[in-house]
Image (spheres, rainbow, N blue to C red):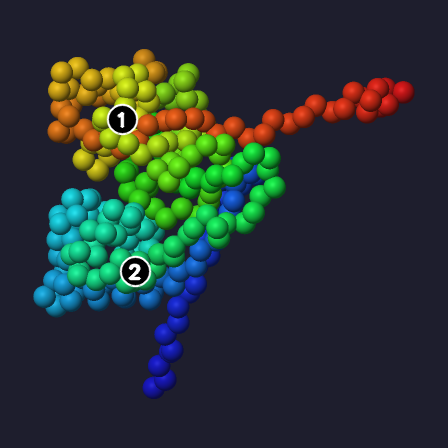
């Protein structure tokens, strides 16, 4: 009897978003999903006294994240963020470098990005995908980005995302790419638009504080406000800008006149 040799498929992940045509930097990354899954499952099994079953739920509880997030890490669909990498390394008693290698995470630094000849643009922020203004899964903000876009100002706490839904219209229209800055409740002023977390879900709303109650108000009156105590709602980021591609210049006047002749 002949036995088929095992094989592994290499996936090249590209982010196919309109930002690519608006000055975004597309950075492919390579993963061997079968190898990564085997490494993570072996680590979980060893940690859970030799039993794989129940280890995902146990790790999710330890990290205070949804079990779906852990499942996404194992499948390679999403990658754990830097905070979770630190926590995971402590739980498994391994270095952060070892954990990144096991989870198939490649470090990306700005110096590795392709150069872009764009006037006055020296900063890049990671594009984290699409977020639904009403409610979305917080796990998307933990993914490893494959697209970076240029901004005029920014720091290591900034990232970009595209708004879906009409919850924040007319202020933020469907398809708007926004620049966000990671922050806590102490960094936010009333009336600013924030990303707030409620358990495993996040929402994009205007922030107001009354006593110990946080109010998250949509700009679109068709949606209901959300409220909760400062212990129930976590402020994760605030909107600091919108991404605007360079405006198209008008056709030179002498060419217009030439065409009329």
Can residue 217 be seen in this snapshot? no
Q: Secondary structure at mark 1?
A: helix
Whether residue 6 is situated above or below residue 211 in the rendered picture: below
Badge 2 density bin: few <14, some 14–19, many ≥20, Cα 10 Å: some
Q: Please provide percent x and percent y for residue 61.
A: 13, 48
**Crowd around label 1: few <14 · some 14–19 · many ≥20 (10 Å):** few
In the image, farthest residue toward the bottom: 1
Residue 231 is situated, as x and y percent measured from the top left of the image, at 13, 29
Residue 80 % position (x, y): 28, 50
Across and down, in percent, residue 223 comes to: 29, 18
Q: How many marks?
A: 2
131 lies left or right of 24: left
Query: Closer to the N terminus: mark 2 or mark 1?
Result: 2
CA gap, disc 2 and disc 1 = 31 Å
Residue at coordinates 34% horizontally, 16% vertically from top-left? 219
Confirm or deny contact between disc 2 and disc 1 (CB under 8 A): no
Q: Quadrant of residue 180?
A: top left
Residue at the image point whose x is 27% and y is 66% from the top: 38
Vertical position of residue 28 compared to residue 181: above or below: below
Residue under numbered circle 2: 97
Left or right of 30 on screen, residue 118: right
User: Residue 134 — which label?
Assistant: none
Q: Which residue is mark 1?
A: 187
Q: Is residue 18 left or right of residue 6?
A: right
For the C terminus, the quadrant is top right
Quarter that holds the N terminus: bottom left
Q: Quadrant of residue 188?
A: top left
């Amino acid at each position: 009897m002949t036995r088929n040799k095992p094989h592994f498929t290499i996936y090249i992940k590209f982010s196919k978003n309109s930002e690519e045509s608006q000055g975004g930097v597309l950075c492919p990354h390579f993963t061997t999903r079968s190898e990564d899954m085997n490494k993570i499952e072996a680590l979980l099994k060893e940690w859970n006294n030799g039993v794989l079953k129940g280890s995902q739920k146990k790790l999710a509880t330890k990290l205070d994240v949804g079990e779906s997030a852990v499942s996404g890490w194992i499948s390679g669909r999403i990658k754990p963020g830097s905070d979770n990498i630190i926590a995971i390394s402590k739980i498994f008693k391994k270095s952060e470098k070892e954990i990144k290698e096991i989870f198939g995470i490649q470090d990306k630094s700005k110096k590795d990005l392709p150069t872009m000849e764009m006037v006055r643009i020296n900063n890049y922020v990671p594009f984290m995908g699409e977020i639904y203004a009403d409610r979305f899964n917080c796990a998307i903000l933990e993914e490893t980005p494959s697209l970076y876009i240029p901004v005029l100002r920014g720091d290591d706490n900034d990232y970009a995302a595209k708004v879906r839904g009409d919850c924040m219209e007319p202020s933020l229209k469907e398809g708007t790419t926004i620049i966000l800055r990671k922050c806590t409740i102490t960094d936010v002023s009333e009336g600013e638009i924030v990303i707030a977390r409620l358990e495993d879900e996040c929402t994009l709303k205007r922030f107001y504080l009354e006593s110990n109650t946080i109010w998250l108000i949509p700009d679109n009156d068709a949606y209901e406000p959300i409220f909760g105590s400062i212990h129930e709602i976590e402020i994760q980021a605030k909107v600091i800008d919108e991404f605007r591609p360079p405006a198209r210049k008008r056709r030179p006047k002498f060419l217009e006149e030439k065409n009329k002749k």
